[in-house]
Amino acid sequence: MVVGIGSMTLPQTFAKIGIILTVAVIVVLAFFSYISATYVLEAMANTNAILRAEKEQNLLNGEAESEEASAEEKEMENSINSVKLDIDGITSPYKLKTRIEYSKMANLYFSDGFKLFFTLIFCFYFLGDLAIYTVGAPNTLQQWVDFEMDFMGMHLTDMALQRFFLIAFAIIVVPLCLADMQNTKILQIITLGLRLVAFYTMIILGALHVMGGRTGGMTHVPMWDFKNVGAVLGSTVYSFMSHHSLPSMLTPIKAKNKSKTTKKTLLADFFTIGISYILLSSTAMLAFSDPNLPDHCELRGTKACKIQDLYFKNFASYDNVFIDYFMLGFPLIVFVTIWPMIAITLRNNIDQLLPKLKPKLEKMRKPICVALAILPPLTIGWFTNNVTILVRFTGGLCGVFIMFTFPAFFVKNSREKCEELNIVGKNEYKSFFQSKFWINAVLGWSGLMFLTNVWLLIKFFINGE
């Protein structure tokens, strides 16, 4: 589900707080992430019921349907015949018949000002996403050629290499942003497959490194360090980020008992990824915490190095050439395939925000939106190679709203709307966490993480740490 580049920053980040606190932080964050995911699921079902109820009421009142009805409205009307508001409760209106995206719920439940805030948060989140990949791709390419550059006697600074590869990366991905990415399902499956193989390979290799006795022993492994707990929140939020994708992932599920299957899938997913993150970070700390290890890994070397900012780089020096190149190669495939998709999504959001232009400029609307989407992350990539701070911004500032704040308001407002319309029926998709206490707890948790990351970013810009 969420084995992206954010998870690759976890081992170095968690090494600052130690194994014990790592487990505690991941468990707490996985718990709150799961709560908010159940809120998204319940709000989707509530919204389906609300739209059907309103549509049925309009039909009962004799309101004629527009000839230019959207595909979504037609689908909703067709579903009314099969899903009636049955006062006996035999047939429930709470079905995931229609995919309800975040934007649809925001339009239904938020005020105009909050809708604008919602759109801006998503734009900044996608911008941060692009910036992370923009920095990550040249960073990975730089690791590939470090050995060759030394061999050829070339002495370029890290930042010079970063910029050189940034230009090469941009030449490949920018033209793709002018297209409309359609039918990318196979590409997404291949990308996800590569991520999963690489992710669990790193866990296995880290464990083998420990069992092979090639570590400095437990004496060098940090146990706990409370003063650095706040610094890990941005990275961990970004690593659990998947909530905005839940509508497209859960709605297509087909099963005899769809509600139970969907809820079990959601629970199993968060449990599995939480355990996986604990294993990844713990094996990394056990394997690569020896202070005598070199700061950087050399390609095709045989000596391990300290935990890197992007953990896959630790295996560039593994004593197997195939693994060396696979671990450095899979991120490049991910970067090249994911970057245009995110850029197109951001381009479309900017298109919604951008007012109507003058006739001559309106013809250039698409290229203008593309430029507004790609120039900021490319500029950021030109001036920094600090992936950690970008992850902290994206996850710790924008991510907390998408992951916690918005779902809490979605479920709160949708519950109130269902009561207002007096919709009868059992919602089998409802969250286990029905009490208002849990909604307030999620909002309080998101506020705590947001303020913590604001303070950390201010501290970074003032002190550079």
Image (cartoon, rainbow, N blue to C red):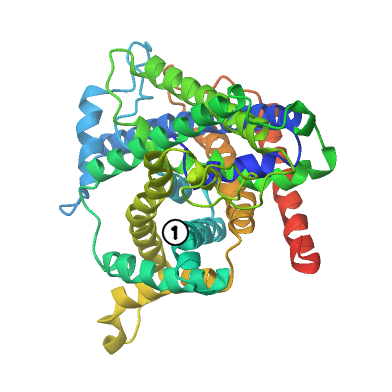
Quadrant position of the C terminus in the picture: bottom right
* Figure check: 164 above or below 77: below
In the rendered structure, the answer to whether residue 81 lies left or right of residue 375 reads left
Which residue: 51% across, 62% down? Answer: 135
Image coordinates for residue 422, horizontal then vertical, percent: 47, 27
In the rendered structure, the answer to whether residue 199 lies left or right of residue 398 reads left
Say whether residue 187 is visible.
yes
Image coordinates for residue 261, horizontal then vertical, percent: 38, 17
Q: Which residue is mark 1?
A: 137
The amino acid on which the numbered mark 1 sits, given as a three-letter code, is: Ala
* Figure check: 424 above or below 244: above
Image coordinates for residue 79, horizontal then vertical, percent: 23, 30
46 or 169: nearer the eye?
Answer: 169
* Figure check: 230 above or below 77: below
Which residue: 37% across, 10% down? Answer: 88
| Label 1 Cα neighbours within 10 Å, binned few <14 / some 14-19 / many ≥20 | many
| Quarter occupied by residue 279 | top right
143 or 186: nearer the eye?
Answer: 143
Which residue: 64% across, 58% down? Answer: 389
